Image: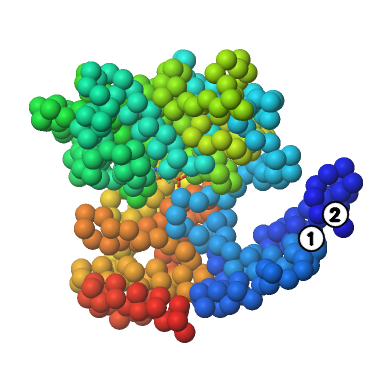
Amino acid sequence: MHELLNRSSATAYADLLDTATGMIASRFATVRQPFSGAGRTELQQLVDEVDLDGAGVGSEAAVRELDGVFLEHAVWFHDPAYVAHLNCPVALPAVAAESVLAAVNTSVDTYDQSTVGTLIERRLVEWTGSRIGFAQGDGVFTSGGTQSNLHAMLLAREWTLARQDAPRHEVLPRLHILATASSHFSVDKAALLLGLADDAVVTVPDDGEGRMDPVALAATLAAIRAAGRIPMAVVATAGTTDRGVIDPVAAIAAHCDAHDVWLHVDAAYGCGLLVSPTRRHLIEGVERARSVTVDFHKSFFQPVSSSAILVRDQADLAGGAWHADYLNPRENAEPNQVDKSLQTTRRFDALKLWTTIRALGADRIGELFDAVVDLAAIVHDEIAGDPELELVGRSQLSTVLFRATPAGTDAATHDALVAQVRRVLFDSGRALVAKTVIDGRPCLKFTLLNPESTLDDVRGVLALVKDAAATLPGIAPELGADLEDALVGTEATA
Ligand SMILES: *Cc1c(COP(=O)(O)O)cnc(C)c1O
């Protein structure tokens, strides 16, 4: 019985992985829609029926069982009708690397646990920093943009506190983070976790399309100072999650410099621009940030997790450093990544990006990201020219915001249809789209992150949206929301 991966189970390991990869390969070859459409009651039953207290069934059987318990009802991001959230199909070499790093189980906390793994991660941090334009940059891989943003805000807090004369407990409640209403909610979460005041995050007005207005930023900075408060950080978003727009980083950086304020650029979504052969200019000025969030698992086609925080000045990372006698004592001269990380034991995610860059080349990754941005621009035009659809703003990246507007219906109906259309499509499993609220009104959202999707693929999803909208009741928005809750309720209790 081979239970653990070791010398004697090496052959069993290869066989077991063959089983797993064969199963996955056949799913990829046959999946025809992004979701089975199974209801939650059915899925709950499927999961509850599995015996977790009895004797084990053996590795082979347990892996085969996943086909029915998991793969049958998984959500497939590679399917062209999956256009909901910021999820991408994954680069093949990265998937292979994922199984390598899982098997070796390297932890990139201290050098003595990871050796060359640490050096590979460091090289990639350096590479990313040089793409940003940091001369003396540093950073570390993280679990995602949420952690990267939290880490950045921690460093900004420590950096700002160190520049005040007053004691920490007096300064803390006076600190503010400035961001637009379109910034990611993880910024607010970070403020809470870092013990800032409830009103710490101040909304900077935008240009009407979701981009930070630099003039309004200057006014907000001045107002905060005038009130005897302290701006701790400005968060510019390079690719907002909904609108896919990019704050004018260079202009924002100028105001941050003038006020001596930490500039953080959240490029969780827009980081693909760093390798884009045609759109790198869109994040000009990012090199003037003190910290940058990049999510390789969004626009570098990496399997979750793969993310990093980069800082312009290596010394700034010290704000989050801790030392333990057993692990990374202060006098230790080895390159311990744990000194720079919020995590201790940490996945060697860098190996996936490493393998991908080696396999495809950086330019090719950028071309793949360009492809989805190009496609989104065409889809914007397509929707703008369709009387049964209404485009809601234009993205600089790959989101598409719109509403269904069947002939003879009013705005209230269009609003109400948003949640209903999304649910009907989700329940059918044929297309997964997202919804959000822009300027107080609901709208549907596509996030195009599949470079192999064609215009016809997207037209197919638009046709499903229009069909669904044409057959739905079209009721008042409040009822629309209620109806959705009711549907969820029935599904859960039926
Ligand atoms: C997705 C996203 C995040 C959060 O990243 P996770 O990897 O999901 O934790 C942060 N900021 C922006 C702009 C994002 O789009």
Q: Position of residue 228 (x, y in %)?
A: 12, 27
The disc at residue 253 is: none
Along the viewing direction, whichever of 412 and 197 lies nearer the viewer: 197
- Tell me which label, 1 or 2, sits earlier in the chain: 2
95 w.r.t. 263: above or below: below
Label 1 – label 2 distance at C-alpha? 8 Å
Res. 271 image quadrant:
top left
Q: Which residue is mark 1?
A: 59
Is 8 drawn above or below residue 83 in the view shown? above
Residue neighbourhood size for the residue with mark 1, other residues' Cα within 10 Å, grouped as few (<14), some (14–19), many (≥20): some
| Amino acid type for the residue under numbered disc 2 | His
What colour-coding does the image apply? rainbow
> How far across and how far down the image is residue 162, in percent?
31, 20
Q: Which quarter of the figure has residue 70?
A: bottom right
Give the number of callouts.
2
Picture disc at residue 2: 2
Q: Residue furthest front?
A: 325
Q: Residue at image x 34%, y 50%?
A: 242
Q: Is residue 24 something that shows in the picture?
A: yes
Neighbour class for label 2 at 10 Å: few (<14), some, many (≥20)?
few
